[in-house]
Amino acid sequence: PPDRPGAAGVGMNTVYLKRCADEERRAKIAAGFTIDGMNMRDASTGEMLWEMNSWPSDWHVAEIQARVPARILQCPAVSRELTFTSVEKVANLRCEHRVYLDGAPNPIEVWDFDFGFVMPGSRNTWQTTVEAAGGGKMLEPTEASGRVTVRTKFTDGDEFTIVESVVRVFYD
């Protein structure tokens, strides 16, 4: 039999079985992972600048739109608070944001955040702060509005991607 130690094909069967187990685990985590809401604040003052408490159910399938006040681009730092629910345990939740302009192949900004362990059946709040590039490196709202997409990937460490989403940003 090919799964007998030393038999031909053992490595391939083991890799295939691990891949199947990982995909099953990923699908189970993804099915129970929801974004409940998100807000952004001026990190210096705490003033709420944008909030979305009703996240679309298809957020991980279809591109969604966010209408954000243009003055957010003038903040030296922005605090983002994400509330999410996970039915399944996640060993090492990570969030990778890639910001693109006009669908270019290379991102204009990259932000990676580590949350860590997520208990099964839990609702969590995750707050992160992003500092502005400053020094004339920021796009004007009129230049960026509707042309910027934020591609977010939630992963379980380096093991696998749980779910991905795309948000198109409009600055009002």
Image (spheres, rainbow, N blue to C red):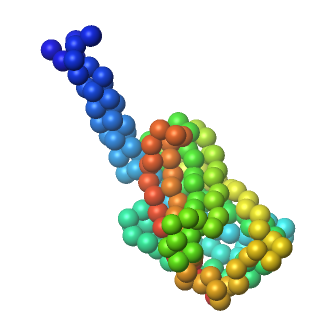
Up-down relation of residue 64 to residue 115 (above or below): below
Residue ID at (73%, 62%): 130
Asked whether, in this view, residue 39 is left or right of residue 21, the answer is right
- Pinpoint residue 37: horizontal percent, then vertical percent: 56, 65
- Pinpoint residue 51: horizontal percent, then vertical percent: 62, 73
Asked whether, in this view, residue 169 is left or right of residue 46, the answer is left
Residue ID at (52%, 71%): 104
Residue ID at (83%, 73%): 135
- Pinpoint residue 91: horizontal percent, then vertical percent: 53, 36
Along the viewing direction, whichever of 139 and 87 lies nearer the viewer: 139
Q: Is residue 65 visible?
A: yes
Residue ID at (63%, 52%): 112
- Pinpoint residue 158: horizontal percent, then vertical percent: 52, 40
State the count of labels: 0
Along the viewing direction, whichever of 62 and 150 lies nearer the viewer: 150
Up-down relation of residue 128 to residue 118 (above or below): below
Q: Quadrant of residue 171?
A: bottom right
